[in-house]
Amino acid sequence: MAHLRSRRVRALAVPVGLALVASLGFLPQAATAAPQEARATVTTDGPLLSYVVNATPGKASMAEVGKAIRAAGGKVVVAHEKIGVIVVHSANPKFAETIRTVRGVQSAGATRTAPLKPSGTTDIGKPQKADLSKAAKLAGAKAEAAGEEPLESLQWDLPAIKADQAAKVNPGSKKVTVAVIDTGVDDTHPDLKPNFSAQQSANCVGGVADTTAGSWRPWNPTEDYHGTHVAGTIAAARNGVGMAGVAPNVKISAIKVSEPETSLFYAESVVCAFVFAADHGVEVTNNSYYVDPWMFNCKDDADQGAIVDAVGRAAKYAERKGAINVAAAGNSNLDLAAKELTDKSSPNDTTPVERKIDPAKCWDVPTQLPGTVTVAATGVKKLKSYYSNYGNGVIDVAAPGGDSRQVPELPAKNGNILSTMPGGDWAYLAGTSMASPHVAGVAALVKSAHPKSSPQEIQWLLKKDADNPGCPQGDATCTGTPHVNGHYGYGIVDALDAVEQD
């Protein structure tokens, strides 16, 4: 999963955020207008942190909460009135504690613990450049002669889910858009440019959507390649260049949520992304990350519970507006259905502290939010990828994510996933980050074939048509039935069935 944080001050989309803030009486200059007696009791000598305050939706209720926020030493960054989520900056170390006592506030908490350090993504290792050796080029020439993309013979993942066959039946509708909520997308890439939707793209870092042209592109193309790779798997065009996506005719948009320099994803940015996607007609969102700084957010912790609440409201809002949310299961080889897990990586913005967690109460967000399609990764042999999280009753479906230990007989002989990279390049990556966009692409095909289907119906169709290999013999980590189990959920998605079903 990818994550970012910056000490630099970023320009916000003032016309968008300020209009809503002003409508609720949250103009920034009003932050100093708290009553004298209230200000006298407020200390602002703590670290300046970002908070989410989750209140009763509605203008009147949120206006009252806004007054309390100012009195407690907070400054409103943006207020999402429709879902009752307010993003606040405050240096009052008791801000959250104070605001939780306010009428109309259901939860509130800090979205971070300290200045942040770099984190990982839900891809495994560094990119491996595509092998364009003489043998690979020869295979590419044969592919072109057969009506395939030049690099398609290196994509074992397409036939693994019958996406190559599906493209001949229905390559997807240009009326369907998949939003890549990630590190940004290089929309100038020749495989992505034909299907890119700038009107549905934005930079949501900090919590306010910036739709300035190009704002959705990676901060640093050398390091922030993750979102571009994900986008290619979903919808790289069949245009005689490079590779092919699972749904090569659907639209893709980029909603950047990773902060510069640190690659951390914060709750306020992710909330903005779901709301923006919902309000701009996106049909599918792909989420190959977890919300920092906690790998698992425990609902019985006030701060972490507020993160679950805020992101959960935003994801549910997108679902109500017609979007199906797809998310990567994670790369720690953990059983998410276990009674207890050990988290050694959280918080990832200060020194991590080993903790025991109850998966029933502590969720990977947004992966385990209700309604989200949770995706495990498989390799070329249709076995669970060695790194992929799993769990009976938690995993919904599986898809190719790559596995260096499962090697295909292809010209490149690379078991990872080939896709687009910034600067017009292509490379291999592996991870549940690579599995999730396969499912997002198939979901887009389902929506293309059945445009009136709801997110719930699309999820049901994904599960119904998935192909389950069943638990590997002798593998005690896989529990369940031949039809639904912890490694595959309902099975590996099937793109051909997605476009052929009645």
Image (spheres, rainbow, N blue to C red):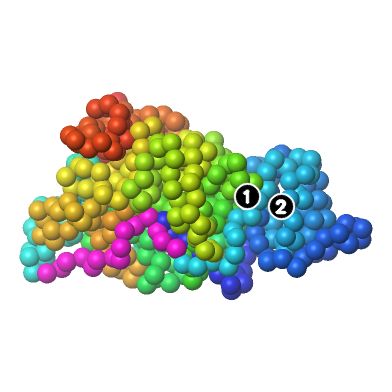
Q: Give the SS element for disc 1.
A: helix
Q: Residue 328, position in %: x, y?
A: 38, 47
Name the side, left or right, on which 77 lies relative to 351.
Answer: right
Q: Residues within 10 Å of mark 1 (few under 14, many from 20)?
A: many
**Residue found 31% across the figure and 53% down from its top:** 431
Extreme-right residue of the structure: 37
**Residue found 40% across the figure and 52% down from its top:** 288
Name the disc covering residue 96, or none.
Answer: 2
- Decide which of 260, 345 is in the foreground and name it: 345
- Decide which of 67, 308 is in the foreground and name it: 308
Q: Amino acid at mark 2?
A: Ala
Q: Residue 291, position in %: x, y?
A: 50, 53
- Decide which of 321, 412 is in the foreground and name it: 412
Q: Residue 296, position in %: x, y?
A: 49, 48
User: Do the numbered discs 2 and 1 sit on residues whose CB atoms are within 8 Å?
Assistant: yes
Name the side, left or right, on which 85 lies relative to 395.
Answer: right
Hey, which quadrant is residue 398 in on the image? top left
Q: Give the SS element for disc 2.
A: helix
- Decide which of 184, 304 is in the foreground and name it: 304
Name the side, left or right, on which 116 lies relative to 150.
Answer: right
Q: Residue 235, position in %: x, y?
A: 32, 52
Q: Residues within 10 Å of mark 2 (few under 14, many from 20)?
A: many
Q: Which residue is mark 1?
A: 303
Q: Is residue 226 magenta?
A: no
Q: Amino acid at mark 1?
A: Asp
Query: Of helix, strand and loop, which mostly describes the magenta segment?
Result: loop
Find the magenta span and give its range.
119-133
